[in-house]
Amino acid sequence: MLRIGILTSGGDCQALNAAMRGVVKGLATNVDNLEVYGFFNGYRGLIYGDYRLLTSRDFSGILTRGGTILGSSRQPFKLMREPDENGVNKVESMKSNYYKLSLDCLVILGGNGTQKTANLLREEGLNIIHLPKTIDNDIYGTDVTFGFYSAIDVACDAIDRIHTTAASHNRVFIVEVMGHKVGWLTLYAGTASGADIILLPEIPYSEKKIIEAIDKRHKEGKGFTIIAVAEGAISKEDAALSKKELKKKREKESHPSAAYRIAKLVEEKTGTEARVTVPGHTQRGGSPCPYDRALCTRLGSAAAKAIMDQKFGNMVAMVNGETKLVPLEKVAGKLKTVDPECQMIKEAKRVGISFGN
Ligand code: F6P
């Protein structure tokens, strides 16, 4: 008899169901008497005992389905040790539900914040396996996270569609791609769709350089410019401010986000019309791309093996094309950011893409 719990936490992405299917199929094919308890809406289900015994039928036909059959929610890590509004001790409650069900392991699918809580539960003595999910691709210790390639497809398609209309109107188009802290998605989607300027949180931009890049295109006879900007892109001046100073400055500005800040700059300094497109949560929606389906089947299957081998306390990562178990204690709390000096940035610059620096 093997009894596992499973939950999906944090922002959703396209391949969560595919990953859960991989885990459960990997176990069901090899273990007699498997019981799988699904906790609903992330850690909330584990805290408040909202769960259901699932059958293999629940995991059938979901390889291509976006979202998560278990639902998800954001439960900030920094509040995990704080009692809730009714005084409930969240950590004790999660442990108590785990032990009440006599679980052998809890499988947790999620991003950075989720991983920190997974590590906390490991420290508290629970058997944990973590699967790295996020369109941001910012989890340390794995080459890739699931959701990333599916989101590239969506963001890239948005920019592709902007290309034709931008050319018709000789405008500057700014497409805002998800990613507050890291720019992997903007870097890949921008490069894949031929964006002229790519602005990432890791490379604070100079306003002057952006204008120069647009002017250069105009001089070359190109009437339009496409800028892919990450949600967290920031100017050099703003990056030099303290958190408090920046918050104050943002409160005074009327721009809802980074893309609008760039649009205002472009209109003021070049006189060219600028338009903003924000694909937003469409980047997390729809079916997982084939790469993510295969990736999740592999990660899920590797997670099943880790559970059968009782190798708990690990993230199932993808390293150099191979699945690998990485101890949670080594990666929790670390972020995988874009190195401004990396090969891909240098290659992109060589083909004329400006990073505004
Ligand atoms: O972490 C995934 C992500 O989609 C980020 O790219 C984005 O900044 C954030 O979540 C949006 O969060 P929410 O769905 O809570 O608005």
Image: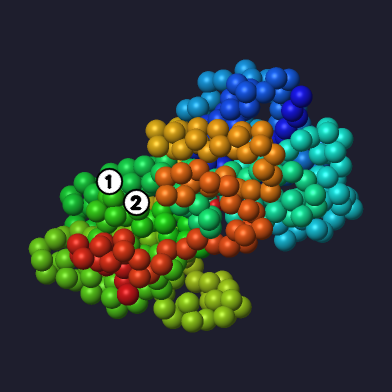
Q: How would you rate the neighbour count of disc 1 (Cα within 10 Å): few for under 14, some for 14-19, many for 20 or more? A: some
Label number found at residue 344: none
Q: Position of residue 155 (x, y in %)?
A: 37, 47
Give the Cα separation between the discs numbered 2 and 1: 10 Å
Q: Position of residue 132 (x, y in %)?
A: 56, 47
Q: Is residue 346 left or right of residue 300?
A: left
Residue carrying label 2:
189
Amino acid at dot 1: Asp
Q: Is residue 72 visible?
A: no
**Disc with the residue nearer the chain's start (2 vs 1):** 1
* Placement of 244 over or under 278, stated as above or below: below
Q: Is mark 2 within 8 Å of ligand 1?
A: no
- In what element is the residue under mark 1? helix
Q: How would you rate the neighbour count of disc 2 (Cα within 10 Å): few for under 14, some for 14-19, many for 20 or more? A: many
* Placement of 259 over or under 47, stated as above or below: below
Q: Position of residue 224 (x, y in %)?
A: 20, 59
Q: Hey, which quadrant is residue 288 in on the image?
A: top left
Residue at x 28%, y 50% (from the top left corner): 192
**Labels 2 & 1 near each other (Cβ < 8 A):** no
Q: Is residue 212 visible?
A: yes
Residue at x 34%, y 77% (from the top left corner): 206
* Placement of 78 over or under 319, stated as above or below: below
Residue at x 71%, y 27% (from the top left corner): 36
Amino acid at dot 2: Ala
- In what element is the residue under mark 2? helix
* Of the pair 219 and 117, the residue shown nearer to us: 117
* Of the pair 322 and 143, the residue shown nearer to us: 322
Q: Hey, which quadrant is residue 151 in on the image?
A: top left
Q: Quadrant of the N terminus?
A: top right
Label number found at residue 160: 1
